Amino acid sequence: MLSQIIAVTGVNIRSMRQRIGSSTVAVVGIAGVVLVFVAVLSIAEGVAATMKSSGDPNTAMILRSGSDTEMTSGMLGDHVNVIKDAPGIARDAGGRPLASPELFVIVDHPLKRGGSAANVPLRGITPEAFKVHERVKIIQGRNIEFGKNEIIAGKAAARQFAGLDVGASLKWGENTWQLVGIFEDGGSVSESELWCDVKILQPAYRRGNSYQSVYAKLASPDSFQQLKDSLTTNPQLTVSAIRAPEYYAQQTLTLQGIIKTIGGIIAILMGVGAIFGAVNTMYTAVASRTREIATLRALGFGSVPVVVSVLAEAALLSLVGGLIGGAIAWAAFDGYQTATMNFQSFSQIAFAFAVTPKLLGMALVYALMMGLVGGLLPAIRAARLPVVTALREL
C-alpha cells in the first residue's frame, strides 16, 4: 500500500501544472487567511512582548489593597514613609531606601497618525526613581531638574504622539511643561509614558501629598516575602505587594483576550471561505483526473492511495499558501510601531507588532487544517467513483 500511495501521490503532484489556475485560487485564498490571522495576532504578541520586557524581578510594587492597577490605587505620604522603612527593601551607600513613590495621571494628547486625542500616561517621580528603574537611560536631550516644570518622554511615546520633541512646551493640568529629554527603558511599557517631578505634578492635579504606587528595590531576590509580610501585617497600612513583572503581565490580559477573540473570529470566517475554495480546487482536480484514477483502480490500486494522493495535493497547496501568507505578514508587520488603548489602565500603550516563530507555526498548522478539510470530500468522491462509470467520463 505504501508504494501505491507514493506512486499515485507523485503522479498527482506532477500533474498540478495542468491545473495551475484553480490551484492558484486555493493558494491565494489560504494565503489571505494566514496573512490576516498572523497580522491580527501579532498585535497581541507585540503587547505581550512589551509587557514581558517590563519590570525587574528584583523590584516590588506596592499598591493600595484591593487595587489591580495604579489608576485605582492611592496612598498618603505618611504611608509612603512607613513603607520605605519596611524590611526587605534595598538601601544605597548612604542608607537611604531604594524606594520610588510615584503618581500616575492621564493627559489628553493627539497621536501623530490621524491627530485624534489619546490618553497618555504622565508619571510623577522622585530622584530615587532612577536608582530603582535602573535601565532608564536618556538618549536625547537631558534629564529633568527636580523642582521645575520639566518632563522627559519615553522613546515610544515620542514616536507615537504628536509634538513630543525636545524643547516643546506642553500644557496639561494647571501647568505648562517643557520637554527636555527622551529616554529608553529596555523596550518596556514605561517607554510609552511621560515622566516629571511628582512634587510639581501633585499640585497641578490637586492631589495633595498623595501617591498611587511605590516601586521598591529588593534587598535580595528572596526578600520579597519578607517585605510583603511586613507590609500586609502592619496595622498602619492597607496595601498589597507584587513583583513588578507579575503586575505588568496582568495589565494587558483583557486587551490580549479581546485581540485574540477578534483574530479567532476573523480567521474562522475567512477560513470557511478558504475551505470552499480548496473544495472547489480539489473537485476540479478529481474531475480532470477521472480517467487516470479509474485506470489506476482497474490496475489494482486501492482506494486509500487515491484518497491520500488528493489530500496530499490539498496539503501541499495549503502549505504553499500558508508560507506565502506568513512571509508577507512577517515582511509587512513585524516590528511595525503603533499604539493602542490598554483597557485596564485606560491609557495608550505603544508597542511593535511581533510576528514570532510560534505564531507562524500556528498559522501553518491552521493552513494545513483548511487544506485537509477542503480536500476531504473530493478525496472520498474520487475513491468511491465506480471504475466503469469513471472510464466512460471524459
Image: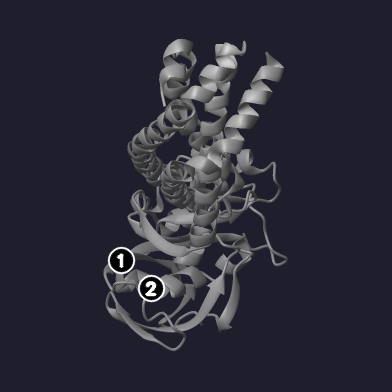
Indicate the secondary structure of the residue bearing disc 1: strand
Which image quarter is the C terminus in? top left
330 left or right, relative to 25? right
* Residue in the foreground of this view, choosing between 387 and 188: 387
Bin the neighbour count of mark 1 within 10 Å (Cα to Cα): few under 14, some 14-19, many 20 and up. Answer: some
Instruction: Using the image, determine if residue 189 lies above or below residue 254.
Output: below
Q: What residue type is labelled 2?
A: Phe
* Residue in the foreground of this view, choosing between 104 and 140: 140
Residue at image coords 59%, 77% = 138
Examine the rendering and report whether any part of residue 262 can be seen.
yes
Q: Pointers 2 and 1 in contact (CB under 8 A)?
A: yes
Colour setup of the view: one colour
The image's mark for residue 118 is 1
333 left or right, relative to 59? left
* Residue in the foreground of this view, choosing between 102 and 117: 117
Indicate the secondary structure of the residue bearing disc 2: loop
The image's mark for residue 161 is 2
* Residue in the foreground of this view, choosing between 108 and 132: 108
Q: What residue type is labelled 1?
A: Ala
Bin the neighbour count of mark 2 within 10 Å (Cα to Cα): few under 14, some 14-19, many 20 and up. Answer: many
Instruction: Using the image, determine if residue 208 lies above or below residue 182.
Output: above
Residue 305, percent from left and from top: 60, 18
Instruction: Using the image, determine if residue 147 lies above or below residue 206.
Output: below
Residue at image coords 67%, 18% = 4
Residue 110, percent from left and from top: 30, 73
